[in-house]
Image (cartoon, rainbow, N blue to C red):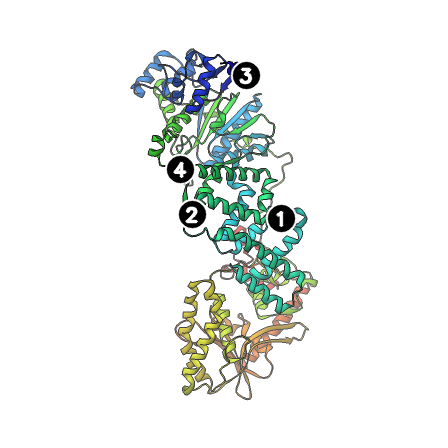
Amino acid sequence: TPLLDQEPDYILLGYQSLIPAEQDWLQARLSAGRAEWLVHGRIDARRTRADAALADCDQVQPAHHYAEHHGDADPVGACLDNLFPDNTQDLRERALKLKTDYARSPLSDQIRLIAADSAEQEARAIDIQVRRWLLEGKRRIGIVTEDRRLARRVRALLERAGIQLQDSGGWALSTTSAAACLERWLQSVEEDFAHQPLLDFLKSPFLCSDAERAGHLESVYRLEHDIIRHENIARGLGRYRRHIESRRQRLSWPPAVFEPLRTLLDRIDQAAAPLRGLLNGTHPAHQLLGGLRESLTVLGIWHSLEADAAGQRVIQLWEELDAAVKRVPLSMQWQEFRIWLGRALEEKTFRPSLASGPVQLLNLEQSHTLCFDAVAVGACDREHLPGKDRTSPFFNAGVRRELGLPSWEQRLDLRLYLFRRLLQSAPQVLLSRRREDQGEPVLPSPWVEALESLHQLAFGTDLHDAELRALLAAPESAVATPEPAALPLPPLLPRPVLPAALLPETASASSHQHLLDCPYLYFAADCLQLAPTEAVRELLQKSDYGERVHRCLEAFHGDVNGLPGPFRKAFDDANRTEAIGMLQTISSAVFARDLEDNFQHRGWLKRWLQLIPDYVDWQIKRAHDWQVHAVEMRVAHRCADGVELKGRLDRIDTDGRQHAILDYKTGAVPNQDAIDSGEAVQLPIYALLAEGDVSRVEYLLLDGPKVRSAGQLSDEQLAHLSDGVAARLTATRAAIVAGAALPAWGDPTVCRYCPMDGLCRRTAWPDSETGAGPEAPAQV
């Protein structure tokens, strides 16, 4: 007692449950008259079900040290006590009692409900109601919700109206840049440094100081564009290193370029070492946490986190987890550790310094002990109110109950207590929910459902706010911009005119085909040189397969450095088996890197290997009349108007007098009608590009069950079409220089695979503009 006399007096507010040690501490001070405990609710025999969370109050004596708020004289409080009674009376009996006691509903002026049609409409309802309250002069307004997505949307709507919020709820710690840096680092280690998480991590501001950031980002740019994207390397520190060395030798990179890349990868490799041994097997949780901290320390991230507000919260969480597993030893696998850490980051919140303002955004627990002029309670559905039990990695519900640890039943009692108190925390309360979410029905909170049913039975009316429902549909309830601007006109079919200076001085078969298929495609892709960023492909696509087949045949018929071949013997039946074996060996070497990337790539190799015998048989027949003259030739031809045609010919054969050109195809091939009409220009342009007399050009289809010619031009027809294509190219370029428009035609066949569809915005054209293709050629 003498020691207690030296202590200050205590007033406890907002505590409704205590652990045994806290009860003993408080009991001593209550008995000495040095403390007072203020609670909201009943702690006597008249307790309701909403007061179950105050059960610990009975364990502390004397009871007269409690200051209770009963609300006996308050009609609203009496009605709410009947909503959650701790007796056997059914709902109809309680409703009859209320109808007898009150001629008019005491709740109708204080509590209103709104059932929105969607999540967006619910957010708009809260936004409108808060603005109405502000116009009425209310200066302490609360928005209480357990739905973080709803909270973010309401905040955005109110800030659009110029209303600043005190966001006490904050947001999940997992959404901060500090937690994102941590997550992407762990993903990089787990996924053998896959390019997507690795690049995200390397671009994080936590990885280096501001003074080093410019040089660091330059190295990251080199790694991303020169190694990952250009070389199509999806993962693996070893593979990144090999291709850095390959480019250093091939392009004579100076030390100032490749040394920072090597240093960066070495630093990443060193930092990953403490975690690699933990990815497999079961390890003590404190060892997993220690490996994480050691890894972040090597990277310098731990120091960066200490200087950041959200980073400090991440470090605090790490310390809490580390202290927990030291008190209660726990072993887990890496995947279990990741789930545990991820759940902790999701449950913890980060709150920056609060801004001043009349509106406060908070969750249910943060609303305890607060009073408002008006309060809106959002997401009153079963998922968020009361919500679901959160499982623990340590003990199940039964064990936690036996050990005296907080159980879901106790948390449920607490949430009901807080909700009941919130209904009387302001003279005006709005309870909102949504009926459905993405087409799925959303069940209302059982507590709100009980409130609606009781009020309907007792007073024959509902609590729904019809006026607010009408305002949701009224255009005048939307926030008006200070200077409303006219809406943009709907996009029309684009018809740009190309400045003559931007017309390319060279042309190719593909660019001329673009000009014929869709002039706007030629304008965007070939003149403006716009192109979407190539994604790193971890799985081979049909175009990649075609490139591999071209490479195999180039080495089979020519000399390619680093690959077996060429086949130097005669193509005849006697050498058939040897030729097949040689091409198979070449193919295995060409596809070797792809097989290293992904086991599924064996399917592409097998597809080609099955076709090799048929290709060799075709080649043996071809060799009777034609011999291979050149492969993969890059050639150019100057047209009459000075434009230079450029291209690459897959293969040129000769019979001693004339030449024949082969173009390998592993995908779609133009039909013969398009070739004969000159709409498919690749073969005529190849004839223009080749040196000497060309008597035949054809596609060789290397797909399907048999190798076969899939389209060809020869002799007089070839000469006629080649001259016509050259003349049309000259005339078309002259028209473009003269100011002819380059319209988008909107041809569905071309648009289906067009990379510029987002630029021409074909899907937004009016119906009258779609399908303008037949008239467009006259403009070019």
Using the numbered discs, state the Cα–Cα distance from disc 4 to disc 2 in whole angstroms.
Answer: 19 Å
Mark toward the viewer: 2 or 1: 2
Residue type, numbered disc 3: Pro
**Residue under pointer 2:** 283
**Residue under pointer 4:** 392
Using the numbered discs, state the Cα–Cα distance from disc 1 to disc 4 in whole angstroms.
Answer: 36 Å
| Marks 2,1: beta carbons within 8 A | no
Image position, residue 645 (x, y; %): 62, 73
Determine the secondary structure under disc 3.
loop
- Out of 643 and 270, give the one closest to the viewer: 270
- Out of 693 and 323, give the one closest to the viewer: 323
**Which label's residue is closer to the chain start, 2 or 1?**
1
Which residue extends farthest bottom?
656
Instruction: Using the rendered view, name the quadrant where residue 606 is placed.
Output: bottom left
Residue at 53% in and 70% down: 680
Q: Residues within 10 Å of mark 3 (few under 14, many from 20)?
A: few
**Residue under pointer 3:** 8
Residue type, numbered disc 4: Ser
Mark toward the viewer: 4 or 2: 2
Residue type, numbered disc 1: Cys
Q: Which mark is residue 550?
A: none
**Which label's residue is closer to the chain start, 1 or 4?**
1
Image position, residue 161 (x, y; %): 59, 32
| Marks 2,3: beta carbons within 8 A | no
Q: Is 173 placed above or below 512 here?
A: above
Q: Is 53 placed above or below 489 here?
A: above
Using the numbered discs, state the Cα–Cα distance from disc 3 to disc 1 in whole angstroms.
Answer: 49 Å
| Marks 1,4: beta carbons within 8 A | no
**Residue under pointer 1:** 208
Q: From where the camera sits, is residue 39 visible? A: no
